[in-house]
Structure formats: C-alpha cells, structure tokens
Amino acid sequence: MSSIPWAESYLGQLRALAGDRVLMFVGARAVVRDAAGQVLLIERSDNSYWALPAGAMELGESIAECAIREVWEETGLTATAVTPFAMYTHPERTFTNMFGDTYQLFVVAFRVDAWSGELLTSTDETTNAGFFGPRALPAPVSSTVLETLDDLAAFEQTGQVVLK
C-alpha cells in the first residue's frame, strides 16, 4: 500500500475540476482499540488536532477498503477485520476546511475488530499517534472523536447501526 498524494487522489482531481463548488466527500473513519480498550488517535499534520484515522474513498476501492487503507497510511497498522457501526450523511454535515473547500460528508465509521503491526507515531499525514483512554483524550481533539465513540458504544449496546 502506498500513500496517494492529494493532487493525484480522486477528491484532489475532482476539486481541481469543480473549483469552489460544494462536493460530496465519501470517506471512512476507524476506531482502533488495544487489548485494554484504549482508543488509537493520530495527531494530524495539517491542523495539529488529535483525530481518529480517517479519509476519503478512492476510485476502485470499497468503503471498508478505504477504512483499512486510511488506518495503514496514518498509523502503519494493518486492519484485518472491520465492522461498520455508524453513517454520517445529514446535509448539516457540510463543512468548509482550512483551504476554503466545502464538502457535504458521507462518512461511514468502522470498528477495527482485528489488527496487526507496529504503531508508527509519525507518517506523511501524522505527527504523533498513541492509544488513550476513551475519556482521557489529548487536546486539542477533533469534534468528531467523542461523538464517534458515543455512537460506537450505542452500536455495541443495541446492535443497531447509528444513522446521522
């Protein structure tokens, strides 16, 4: 697996063609836990926020493959089993990023049920990474982390996929 430069990514190519129009962002977010139940967070190199591994789906891959690839690109870990537990698709999930690009999100959150490898604390997309207690997270933390962890807890209690 190799990391795809932004300009060569599907979303990067689409953004170059669409200019400043609102685009649909289809992507995946992953919750990786260790044996003690701690959650893996990465410190993003673009904004220094702590977040769950996540990113945009590329042409030619499934949404589950996207989650697996993003975990690998951002942490060096190989996810070998994933379970979808939440989908974030409401139009109010529209946001403008730090580059002035606006997207409506369609994100599927996955629980990583099995993984292998050694954690990399620095990659092309991250400046740090580590496992943290679910309520003892580093700051600043992305606004999506606590919501996603709460949605995973709801899924694990009910077995119902969370739709937002």
Image: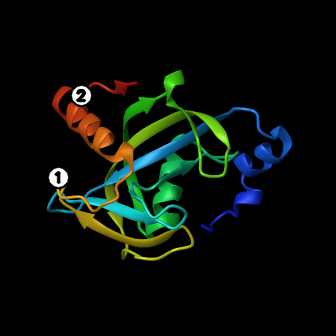
The kind of secondary structure element at disc 2 is loop
Task: Say whether residue 22 is left or right of residue 122.
Answer: right
Residue for point 66% across, 48% down: 58
State the CA–CA distance, disc 2 to disc 1: 22 Å
Which amino acid type corresponds to the residue marked 2 in the rendered image? Answer: Gly
Using the image, determine if residue 30 lies above or below residue 20. Answer: below
Task: Say whether residue 2 is left or right of residue 65.
Answer: right
Task: Say whether residue 54 is left or right of residue 8.
Answer: left
Q: Which mark is residue 135?
A: 1
Task: Say whether residue 141 is left or right of residue 70.
Answer: left
Estimate the x, y position of residue 132 in percent, counting from the top left: 22, 63
Give neighbour class at mark 1: few <14, some 14-19, many 20+ (Cα, 10 Å): few
Residue to which mark 2 is pinned:
159
Residue for point 51% across, 68% down: 45
Estimate the x, y position of residue 113 in percent, counting from the top left: 30, 51
Residue for point 17% across, 62% down: 35
Residue furthest to the right in view is: 17
Task: Say which quarter of the image contains residue 144.
Answer: top left
Using the image, determine if residue 51 lies above or below residue 63. Answer: below
Quadrant, the N terminus: bottom right
The kind of secondary structure element at disc 1 is loop
Which amino acid type corresponds to the residue marked 1 in the rendered image? Answer: Arg
Estimate the x, y position of residue 149 in percent, counting from the top left: 27, 43
User: What colour-coding does the image apply?
Assistant: rainbow
